[in-house]
Image: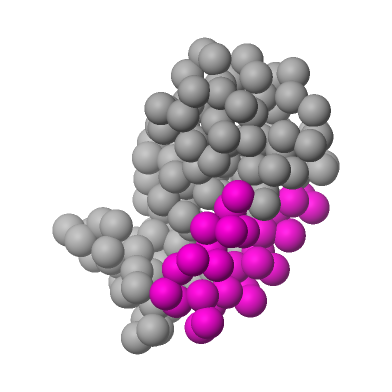
């Protein structure tokens, strides 16, 4: 299984199927694809294959996840999907210039970064969750997800 397919399987496992929770700021959601992020999309009829294509194009490729070591790739992919970004947190954790775009410098630092930098990235993600207005409602689940992503990132796909 290639890295994208493995990461997609993890994310879909986290996101689940169709949901329409009035407290969710994303609105109607299916496979983690939200109406707020894709207002022109008919969420209810979204197929798993359509979701996979969106994830590959708009999250995996846009954030250069395929060029990262597995642990960084999975956590960055998840940050892009669940938190709308991640590049600046990664750059801060890596002591890189914070331009918000994953490029050659960020990728090179990820390739040789010690585990402490990766753990700092995860901590920055957790801090960002805690600042969100919906943290009281969804925070426990978000933090559990972050811990599961950290665990899954320890096991690269074969």
- The vertical placement of 81 against 96, above or below, is below
Task: Name the residue located 57 percent from the left edge and 34 percent from the top edge.
Answer: 92
Residue 120 lies left or right of residue 52; in this view the side is right
Q: Position of residue 157 (x, y in %)?
A: 76, 37
- In this picture, is 112 found above or below 57? above
Is residue 13 at all visible to an observer of this figure? no
Looking at the picture, tell me which residue is in the foreground, 83 or 29.
Answer: 83
Quarter residue 19 falls in: bottom left
* Magenta segment includes 145: yes
Where the N terminus falls, by quadrant?
top right
- Magenta-colored span: 124-152
Based on the picture, tell me whether residue 155 belongs to the magenta stretch.
Answer: no
Residue 151 lies, with reference to residue 65, above or below; the image says: below
- Tell me if 102 is positioned left or right of 122 in this view: left
Residue 114 is at least partly visible in this image: yes
Q: Which residue is at 49% across, 71% downward?
A: 17
Q: Residue furthest left?
A: 40
């Amino acid at each position: 299984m290639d890295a994208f397919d493995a990461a997609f399987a993890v994310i879909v496992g986290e996101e689940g199927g169709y949901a329409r929770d009035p407290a969710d700021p994303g609105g109607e959601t299916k496979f983690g694809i939200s109406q707020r992020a894709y207002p022109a999309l008919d969420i209810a009829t979204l197929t798993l294959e359509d979701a996979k294509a969106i994830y590959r194009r708009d999250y995996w490729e846009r954030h250069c996840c395929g060029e990262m070591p597995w642990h960084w790739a999975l956590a960055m992919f998840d940050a892009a999907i669940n938190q709308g970004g991640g590049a600046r947190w990664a750059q801060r954790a890596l002591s890189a210039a914070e331009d918000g775009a994953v490029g050659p410098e960020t990728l090179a630092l990820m390739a040789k970064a010690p585990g402490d930098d990766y753990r700092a990235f995860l901590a920055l993600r957790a801090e960002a969750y805690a600042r969100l207005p919906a943290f009281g409602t969804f925070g426990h689940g978000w933090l559990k997800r972050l811990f599961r992503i950290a665990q899954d990132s320890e096991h690269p796909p074969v």
